[in-house]
Image (cartoon, rainbow, N blue to C red):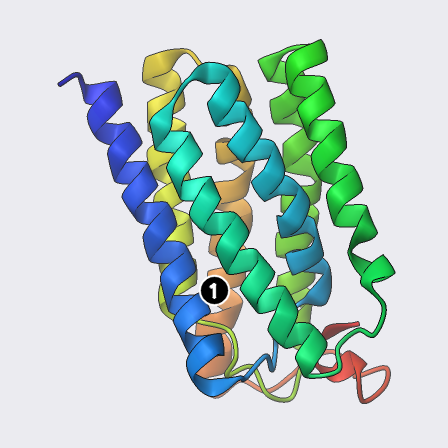
Amino acid sequence: MEWAEVLGWAGALAVVCIQLPQFLLVVRTRNTHGLSLTTWVIAIGTSIGWFDHGLRLAEPVQIWPNILGLITTATIVYFLWRNGRFRSLRTLLPGFALGALLVGLDWGVSSMAFGIAVIIPQAYGMIRQAIALMRAPIVTGVSIPAWVAQVANQAIWLAWSILKHEWGTGISASVSVVCALFVLTWRLLRAGGLGPILPSRARTAADLA
């Protein structure tokens, strides 16, 4: 087994480690405090895009984790809806539109175009999650182990992309690892007793508008 394959399956395992803590926390507690609705709408599109990217490359290490990602994302979005964070399914349309755009770029342009396109919403979603952690009075719905795994995951995929010369994944992972580390830092600061530093705009914006 080559190092690239080892790293690929390590990355796939890391993806599972990212998704399961947040999935289990939300399913067990029904708690979505501190979760960014914007981040999870974006996750719909990026999960579709990465799943399709794995299909195009014929890489099982990217296909299977993103099937799980779609299931996890759909479940968490359901609980966000159940907890009154949004009312209309039209709220989710930008996520599906993003997925369609990423698929089109991946097949119609290039892997590099896909990598550049996918990192913009991914980075934006992570920044929105960081803002939610700065604003929300309660952040117990955000899983620390999930973000630790996210940082490790992006570092693994960056190494994998270098070995495989797969620049779409490399562009995405290099930016994502920095953004994920930023989110994790704020979650740890909140766990350590730091209160919100940004004002809540409204009751529903307390978790994140």
Residue at coordinates 37% horizontally, 18% vertically from top-left? 162
Q: Position of residue 176 (x, y in %)?
A: 53, 41
Q: Residue furthest left?
A: 1
Q: Residues within 10 Å of mark 1 (few under 14, many from 20)?
A: some
| Residue 185 pos. (x, y %) | 47, 64
Residue drawn at x 59%, y 88% is 138
Question: Which quadrant does the N terminus fall into?
Answer: top left
Residue topped by disc 1: 185
Res. 130 image quadrant: bottom right
Instruction: Name the foreground residue: 107 vs 150.
Output: 107
178 and 100: which is toward the camera: 100
Which kind of residue does numbered mark 1 sit on?
Thr
The residue located at (39%, 56%) in the rendering is 18
| Residue 108 shows in this picture | yes
Q: Is residue 84 above or below residue 107?
A: below
* In the image, residue 63 above or below residue 111: below
| Residue at disc 1, secondary structure | helix
Image location of residue 117, percent across then percent down: 70, 28
Q: Position of residue 61 (x, y in %)?
A: 34, 31
140 and 80: which one is in front? 80
Query: In the rendered view, does 52 fall on the left or right side of 135?
Result: left
Q: Quadrant of residue 155?
A: top left
